[in-house]
Amino acid sequence: MGYDDPGRHAPVEPSSGVPAAVLENVFDDPAHGEPGRDRLAVHVAWEMVLAAGLAVLIWLLWRADPAVLGDPGLRVLLVDVVALGLLALAAGLSLRTAAVNLAIGPVMVAAALHCAEQGDRGVALALGQAAAVAAVGGLALGLAVTVLHVPGWAASLAGAAGVVVYIGPRSEPVLVQSGYDPRGSAFYLFAGFAAVAVLGGLFGAIRPVRRLVGRFRPVADPARRRGAVAATVTTLACVVSTVLAALAGILVATNGRDTVGPGDGLDWTVLAVGTALLAGTSAYGRRGGIFGTLLAVSLVGVVFAWAHVEGWAVSRWAVGGAALGVGLLVTRLAEAYGRPRPAGADPEPPALADSTLGSGWSVPRPTKLDDWPPALPVRPDDTPTDPWDASRWETRPPRWDGGDR
């Protein structure tokens, strides 16, 4: 099936006064984009807010129980943060491509159950099997989204339903058979996650990369295809996000747990998507920050650790729902203040002289009235005559009898 790419080979209209020869270097989307480049100031400001909130929560956690930030407890916390971070990276990547993957939560639970059951055969084998199945599932999801050109949330929700059916027969917690303990390399895992998150944000801030990743984002009628390049990038994003979810499941299953409980995993999806939105990733795709994912994931992880220390029963549904609510507000800010600043704004056209209230809210300006009554035109060869000239009244003698004699 071919992919039509409207405006790909047609010259771009220089409606903003920008020459057509340089539009490719000015527009984020030369076919339909706005003149100018996306502004990152709003993301930087929000990331400063996230950093401040994270500092406050770490201080509260340290006051509640300093041992949590010690060597044994800190390793467990870091592995949990990395597991959530991989899931948030999966959600953020799919969000950037405007095809959010809602199947990442069920995929993570399925991978955790598989590792718990098959871990005695070697964690590498279980990891390879889970990653391979996740890659095939992500490829099928990507093809469904791009070939049928349907919303990513709808296609991935159908995929999530299929994974939940796979999880369904397990009604009891599964004993973890693996002997792998990721806590021994917790600092290296966290450093790797932080590097991937920050480098991904930096590359996403580069205009050509951002334009390439977010090319599937609709700019006109959503039914119009965005081209073969957009379809390829979106398919790869579906594959990578599904594999990242499977890797997160492996960490969840092996982080000092004896059993892995079955579940539909949708609470993990809500938590991951909410964390990605909280990080500053736009729900419409393409736009996002640099350090937002690292800060948001760390903040959510510390929230769970603090709640556990305080003895509060906080569910993933509650935290995920709150993150979604705040994340939607952040999306509104990112779209309103992160849009390109016009390179040259056209002056406001003057109001038409014959405009009326029925055609808009502009009131016509009063015009100068001509002299009234209007003067008759004067021929150039005519000589003006004084109406009070005496010769006009004395050409003939006055007649009083009304007739000739």
Image: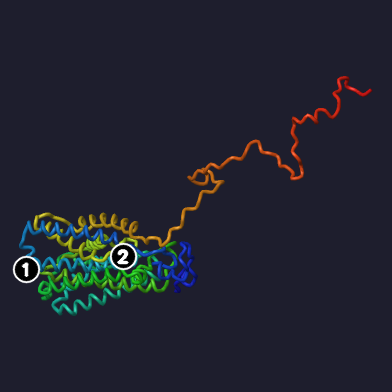
The answer to which image quadrant residue 139 occupies is bottom left
Residue 239, above or below 396: below
Q: Is residue 109 visible?
A: no
Tell me the kind of residue under disc 1. Answer: Asp
Crowd rating for badge 1 (residues with CA inside 10 Å; few <14, some 14–19, many 20+):
few
Q: Is residue 394 above or below residue 241?
A: above
- Of the residues shown, which amino acid type is indicated by label 2? Leu
Q: Is the residue marked by circle 2 packed among few (<14), some (14-19), or many (20+) residues within 10 Å?
A: many
Coordinates of residue 377 in the picture (x, y in percent): 71, 42
Q: Is residue 69 above or below residue 395?
A: below
Name the residue carrying label 1: 71
Q: How many marks?
A: 2
Looking at the image, is mark 1 or mark 2 earlier in the sequence?
A: 1
Q: In this view of the protein, which residue sits in the foreground, 317 or 325?
A: 325
User: Which numbered marker is on residue 95?
Assistant: 2
Q: Secondary structure at mark 2?
A: helix
Q: Is residue 174 left or right of residue 282?
A: left
How are the colours assigned in the image?
Answer: rainbow
Q: Looking at the picture, how far across and down is residue 368, in whole percent? A: 57, 41
| Residue that protrudes farthest toward the top in the picture | 401
Residue at mark 1 to residue at mark 2: CA–CA distance: 35 Å
- 222 relative position to 402: left or right: left
Q: Residue at x 41, y 63 (%)?
A: 35
Q: Position of residue 134 (x, y in %)?
A: 26, 73
